[in-house]
Amino acid sequence: MLETPNPSTNPRNLYTWCACLVSPAKMSKKPAAQPTLHKVIMVGSGGVGKSALTLQFMYDEFVEDYEPTKADSYRKKVVLDGEEVQIDILDTAGQEDYAAIRDNYFRSGEGFLCVFSITEPESFDATQEFREQILRVKNDENIPFLLVGNKSDLADKRRVPLDTCRERAQHWQVPYVETSAKTRDNVDKVFFDLMREIRSRKSDDSRATNGDVKKKKGKKMKCSIL
Amino acid sequence: MGPPPVVTGISPKEGPPGTRVTIRGEFLGTSVTDLIGLKICGCDCLLSAEWKSKNKIVARSGPCKGRGDIIVTTRSGGEGTSTVQFRGYHESIGPVKESAVWVEEAAPPSLPWGRRPMSPTTYIPPDPLGLSTEGDDCKFPEEELHEMFPDGSGKLSDDNFQPGWYLLEHHSNTSFEDLKAGMVFLQRKVESQKEGQLSFLKANTGAVMDQLDRLVLLKNMYEEDERKNGKEPLPSLQAAIEESITLADSLFSEILSRKDNADKTREALSLLTRHKFLFQLPASIDRNIRKKEYDLVVNDYTRVKNLFGNTDVKLFQKILGEIDKKIEDLKEKLYNRMKTMPINVQEQIKYIRLLISLNWEGDAAWVAINSRKDYLMSLMNKVKDHFKQKEEQEFSDKNKRKLKEAESEASAVRGAWCAAACGALSAQLHALWPLARRYFAGELAGEPTDHQRQAQLKEMIIAAVELFSDHMRTCLLSGTGSKNLPIDALRVRLVANLRHMREAYEELIKLDLPSQPLSIVEKVIFDYRVYGMTMFLQRAHKRVKGLAEKETWKIEEFTDYGAITNLPHLLETYTEEALSAIHKCVSGGGRREGVLLAEGGEPARAAIKLTQGLLLAYVAVLQDLALHLDDTQEFNNNNLSVALEQRIEEGASNSRSWQQRLLLAGTNAHYTRRVTLTNISEAFHNYGFPAPTEAIQATKEALSTLESTIAETYLEHKGDPLVGTIETSMDMGRHKTDADAVIDDARPYVYEIINNLIAVHAEVDGVCGAASSRYVRLICETVCEELARLAACAPGAELVAPQAAFQARLEHTLLHVATAEHLTRKAENYLMEALSTIPPLENEEEKKRMDSIVEGFKKRMELQLASLNCNMETV
Ligand SMILES: Nc1nc2c(ncn2[C@@H]2O[C@H](COP(=O)(O)OP(=O)(O)OP(=O)(O)O)[C@@H](O)[C@H]2O)c(=O)[nH]1
Ligand SMILES: [Mg+2]
């Protein structure tokens, strides 16, 4: 599409970097001793308890005060089915003010916890948009994804029926779990379940890479340019 | 050493300098002081770090750019690691963007991936594609770029420039068409560079011509300048510069000196404000003193002493001196206030306290006590003088008034004096004693421990009380005047005075004064009571003395002891009244007072003595009344008929005959002795006074003597004439006696004697009743004595004649028979004596005749004899 540029003025041409794009894994220069890293992204509307779930998982603490998040980063070692792994959690902003920066963040995610509050139908409605944005950015129907109904301790204020939630999960073909950041109910479960999915996806991927690399490459390239 | 800190969480994970970040992790320090280091992206952020817990720190990011670790260092765990990273970026600032300016204090840190430091003024070259760059908002994540081009850079000028990076960084959202257009633009640029210098000149002809013009202009200007200023413009320039230097110097030094002055003024001002308290103190002390807020003054003074007491600053010392002087004045003032009487004790104590807190060097409380005592003394003297003067006035006014009135006024004055003195004493001691007590309790500083003080205080109190007692003695006990006061007024006054003194006394007892001064007061009261008692008895005495005038000789009553006038009753009434007054007014003792009339005590003795005097006065009155011979009235010595004619109840009492008065006095005395004295004695008993035995005894004796005297007087005046008639009567009869005549009756003188006796008896009996026998007996005795005398001196020859002897014997026998009931032993003896001179009867015949004559006499004289013997006491 472009004519060959003069190499003296431009040491590398555009094709070169396009070629580089195809093998991102190769570029990771992390020490070999580091355990496998699973990148989890928390998504969902403001105030549904994403940060609360994260802090509960990371530090066993529950924060009563609501302080809107911009973008927080957490990373620690956990033992997943006997194997030591690292979990990296990116806690994103639910507030619409920060919606513009979401795309960039979603790109790096390997798995998503899509959180809503069972006391807030609007947050449940918003999950639809989040799902669509993720699929658009990741371009992958099978991206590891859990639908999480939080604040299960507030059963008396529940405004999103359980059936509706299950229905939607079924429709998306994702698991549905109800949690409470306050009581720590199912908190570990959602993170570990998601990591398991990521892990299994990764092993699938490596198998696929070994088999047919080119097929993937083309797909990826297209996405980047678009 | 504990485990090193690990940061596992950062919120938010990116932001411009000054972002508030929450750092979470483990072992982030055991306390605030354990945290000794915090670096975010290599920037030291310890200053802004807030240690929250061992899992949480809040800090602000520094002026870093790019990604970096968050390194926490603790004393306990050393330098830590981090699993998460923070990315700092500088926001491009536009007019619509909110921003906070972060002042860069340190040199910008080297970027983690940078090969060389960035120059502070980064020149951003225009976009090589000729496209406008996108905004920061939709940035391509930098970490991905790093991952994609580990050795690359997005900077056009860098060696390792990576076009891919640049495109992704700046044109990730640029459409393909635009990119193509950009490519064409770039190509054109590259081509144009290839054409060389000529083409360059061609392209820039306008600019080159412009430069030439400028050069010519410059040259012209230079030449003109040289013409104007000569070849050597420097010296004049130098001179100008030097001049300006000196000017600048002078300006500078002037400003400096002005600044100095300003600084000094400012310093002085700040000194003034800082030590405002000190400077304002003299004024505020004055103000507070005026407002009598002494406590404030004391507070301020102690404060200033504490703050500036040891100052070396001359100014402060001067002010302190001024303050000290004011305080000295205040002390003097307080001291005088405290000393100046009258003052209430609370106030005085307040002043004492103030003086103590102001370090008065004297013993303020002791001075206060002394001044109180002096005041009390002078007050008492003043009271005394005042009332004395008033009293004198009353008396000097007496020309206008009657003495009596003046006296009652004077007594009122003395009562007022007493009340005032009592009030003064109790009020002042009421203040003084508690003051002294507090003093000795050590509450009021000074030297209460000085053991002389106690003794001195005691002396003071005793002196005061003694003065009081002296005054009261002069006032109440040295009686001028009250002699003529009506008894009721006297009593009222006495009771009132006593009440005043007792009230004061009561107050002193309540104060818990020592017993010595109390006793002094008690003594005055006691003496006054004795005085009262004396007064009452003296009054009674006086009244008794006046009884003589009261005697009307009217017979009040016929008693067992004869007829009496009202004198005995009056005596009893007076005494009774006196006793009852004593009982009511003075005998009852108050709290802590002695019994007035204790058995054997001095007052009791005095009372008895006074009673005795009173009773004896009564006796004297009686005596006077009885024995006072009225010249105008003849002692009625007439015959029976006269005596009988004068009916005793009749007639004006003042026309009572002398002998009747005598007799009445006698019965009065007798009655008094037997009845009234007993009653009086009983009255004493009833009032609980000691029995006045001596007085009664003495009076009884006096009365007995009086009675005898009366009886003798009566005899003297009544019996003597009667006896005198016997001899003459006898002689008269002898004339008629015939020697031979048969004697069958006594001679008339016998009948005369009997008749006279009857008359006496009648008279005496009329007055004395049963007691009359005394007088009759006495008269009989004298008669008998006379008979005996006559018989003794009769010539014996005469009686030898049997007739005469018979006659004489008969007469004696008849007299004996007639007066048998009234004959005392002595009288009997006299008769026997007379008979013994008469020769006995010669024969039985004679005796029988005599007997028959005697029987005849008895029969004949029955009426007379009965009247003579009626109403007789048995001997
Ligand atoms: N009762 C209850 N309250 C919860 C629970 N989870 C979160 N909350 C509360 O909900 C509020 C919001 O929680 P966050 O975790 O800050 O919400 P978020 O989803 O992170 O919100 P953004 O950061 O704005 O996207 C906080 O006051 C929490 O205390 C839960 O499980 N039960
Ligand atoms: Mg949040």
Image (cartoon, coloured by chain):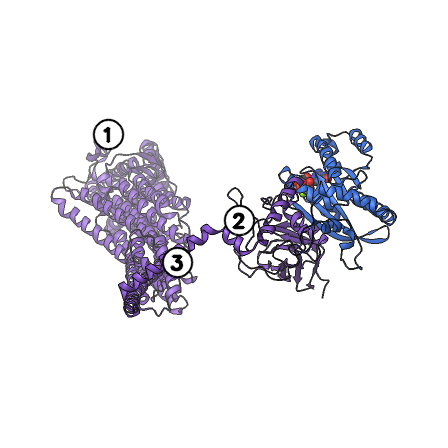
Mark 3 belongs to which amino acid?
Answer: Leu
Mark 1 belongs to which amino acid?
Answer: Glu
Q: Residue at label 2?
A: B100
Residue displayed at 68% across by 37% down: A45
* Distance from Cα at disc 3 to Cα at disc 1: 184 Å
Q: Are marks 2 and 1 in contact (CB under 8 Å)?
A: no
* Distance from Cα at disc 3 to Cα at disc 2: 47 Å
In percent of width and height, residue B389 lies at 18, 51
Colour chosen for chain A: blue
Q: If you read the primary sequence from the N terminus, does the residue marked by circle 2 or circle 1 appear first?
A: 2
> How would you rate the neighbour count of disc 3 (Cα within 10 Å): few for under 14, some for 14-19, many for 20 or more?
few
Give the numbered dot on residue B215.
3
In percent of width and height, residue B810 lies at 31, 41
Between residue B661 and residue B429, name the one nearer to us.
Answer: B429
> How would you rate the neighbour count of disc 2 (Cα within 10 Å): few for under 14, some for 14-19, many for 20 or more?
few
Q: Residue at label 1?
A: B650
Check the picture and name the quadrant holding the N terminus of chain B: bottom right
Check the picture and name the quadrant holding the C terminus of chain B: top left
Q: Quadrant of residue B131?
A: top right
SS category of the residue bearing label 2:
loop
In percent of width and height, residue B118 lies at 58, 59
The chain in purple: B
* Extreme-left residue of the structure: B399
Chain at numbered mark 3: B
In percent of width and height, residue A211 lies at 88, 48
